[in-house]
Image (spheres, grey):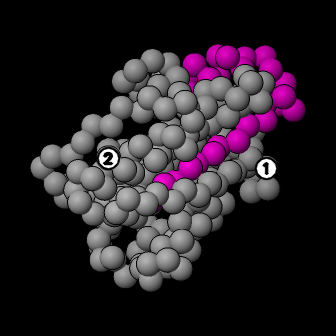
Amino acid sequence: MDRLILATSNQDKVQEISSLLLDLNITVLSINDFSDYPVVVEDQDTLKGNAIKKAREFASYFNMPALADDTGLEVDFLNGEPGIFSARYAGEYTSYETNVQKLLKELDAVPTKERKAQFRTVMSFAIDDQVYSVEGVCKGLITSDKRGTGGFGYDPVFYVPKLDKTFAEMSLSEKNQISHRGIALRKAKELLLSKFGA
């Protein structure tokens, strides 16, 4: 295996994932390297289902191994929402900011101790007819207002107590050390190295 396509159109995800795959002896490609790519409808009812579907469709379309992830923010007070709908919490084709504002409104006046949440990423790797999946979780709290200017999505309101920072206040390398996506991706790298010598 000498090439791998990242099955996402989200350029923020491409940057995070690519930075963690730099030391592998493979060429990591994204949709930016092609003039056309499949638009995958994320209609599964679990993060794993969506990740597997994206990985399979990209692998089939490009005829090369594909790595996909699906990530959800799961807030205890909201019974696990927004979950699989995290990217479209405030509706289809909404901005990061609109989703964040909806979340803050839903948690308005909720005390800090009841604002527990976790980010969960399922990463799936498709090669030939096989699919392998791994998972990463990072626990934290939802802040009452935005903090920091880095990251993307819900990063400005996802606070990690052990570092006393939101994801948006961390450098990319800091975030990758502890984040849900970083944890899942390190597991995926171990899988690639052990099974395929990447």
Q: Circle 2 sits in a helix, a strand or a loop, which is it?
A: helix
Residue 74 is drawn in which quadrant? top right
Residue closer to the observer: 172 or 8: 8
Residue closer to the observer: 141 or 85: 85
Q: Give percent across and percent down for residue 93.
A: 36, 24
Q: Nearer the viewer, mark 2 or mark 1?
A: 2
Q: Are marks 2 and 1 in contact (CB under 8 Å)?
A: no
Where does label 1 land, which residue? 161
Measured Cα–Cα span from mark 2 to mark 1: 38 Å
Q: Give percent across and percent down for residue 170.
A: 60, 55
Residue lying at the far left of the rendered structure: 35
Residue 148 is drawn in which quadrant? top right
Q: Is residue 113 magenta?
A: yes
Residue in view at x 37 percent, y 50 percent: 56
The residue range painted magenta reads 100-125
Compared with 94, 87 (above or below) is below
Q: Give percent across and percent down for residue 145.
A: 66, 30
Q: Is residue 164 left or right of residue 121?
A: right
Residue in view at x 87 percent, y 32 percent: 113
Residue in view at x 23 percent, y 51 percent: 61
Q: Give percent across and percent down for residue 110.
A: 80, 20
Where does label 2 land, which residue? 57
Q: Is residue 189 left or right of residue 103?
A: left
Give the residue type at disc 1: Pro
